[in-house]
Image (tube, helix red, strand yellow):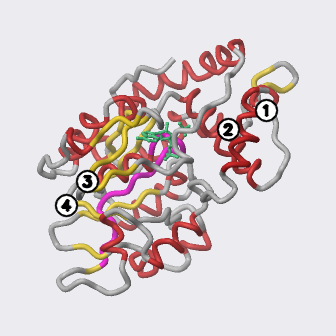
Amino acid sequence: MAFLLVSAYLLLTHTQGAPVENGALLETLKSQVGLFSNKSEHYSAQVRPPGTSRQIPQTIIIGVRKGGTRALLEMLDIHPNIVVAATEVHFFDWDENYVKGIDWYRSLMPFSYGNQITIEKTPGYFTSPQAPERIHDMNSSIKLLLILRDPTERVVSDYTQVYYNRVESHKPVQLFEDIVIKNGALNTKYKAIQRSLYDVHMEKWLKLFNLDQIHIVDGNTLIKDPLPELQKVEKFLNLPSRIMSSNFYFNQTKGFYCIRSDGRERCLHESKGRPHPVVNNTVLEQLYSYFREHNAKFYRMVNHSFDWH
Ligand code: A3P
């Protein structure tokens, strides 16, 4: 109930605010009118700076939705050898975009210099049935980044995002517990639960890509201590170490790390890092136990364990 009240309050105070991540339209508009405050603003410009060109991404952040994909992208954007696509492109997971072809895809990328890597992120790729094969067809030796967090936490985060979207568009909302439990049992058909079955999705990627092409970022660690996770990515991408501890500061009000780069300080959009509802313990336990076996299978697949419930 407290969560519902807090949300109603937030809705009232945020009616002017931007829609959340899947408001790709807003981001597209912003990039078109040059409203981005970070480095990508420069490269997204319609006028090509001399010596630059638009490149098909050499690296893609494939997901997972609510794993911390935006934080990862924005933090990597600090690196001078990285340029990022401002919008979620949805090229490989949405048929209506895929049919537009690779030149359309390239046209959405920022301008870059020869020594820079272009990165795009579309969290929907990880769980998309078509994305692995389509990405493989484009570049079978591409390097992929996948950021994951505790699967139960991810379900709650996914619910929270949909919840706020519905509140903002005046649609009815349901309590977390009422969606997750149906007729006394866990509703495993709930999309947010399906998306957290990391082993199921990973299997499709590993049929086409070698494990050493996919670097997994620990989303829980990225929240608590971003630098070491980013340094691992720099290594994976064979880039010199350029991201420093001075690029981050902890913002007490937001409760998350924010970015200091190019003489400016900025936190992620308010839709990132919102309070989650307090979930009934029994329901949480049901989720933990449902994911346990899937997690164990995932750890075996990737030869790595995570600190998940
Ligand atoms: P919550 O909003 O549920 O806390 P994505 O960008 O893939 O949608 O992931 C969103 C999640 O990124 C947020 O989920 C938040 O926990 C996490 N995150 C990681 N680092 C963050 C940061 N520095 N600022 C805000 N959110 C961050």
The kind of residue tagged 2 is Tyr
Q: Residue at 56% x, 34% y: name it.
A: 154
Mark 3 or mark 2, earlier in chain: 2
Mark-to-mark CA distance, 2 and 4: 35 Å
For residue 25, side relative to residue 229 (left or right): right
Mark-to-mark CA distance, 4 and 3: 14 Å
The kind of residue tagged 1 is Ile
Q: Which mark is residue 261?
A: 3
Q: Could you classify mark 3 by the number of other residues whose Cα lies within 10 Å: few (under 14), some (14-19), or many (20 or more)?
A: some
Question: How many numbered callouts?
Answer: 4
Q: Residue 57 magenta-drawn?
A: yes
Is disc 1 placed on a helix, strand or loop?
Answer: helix
Q: Which residues are magenta?
A: 54-68
Mark 2 or mark 4, earlier in chain: 4
Q: Are marks 2 and 1 in contact (CB under 8 Å)?
A: yes
Say which residue label 4 marks: 81
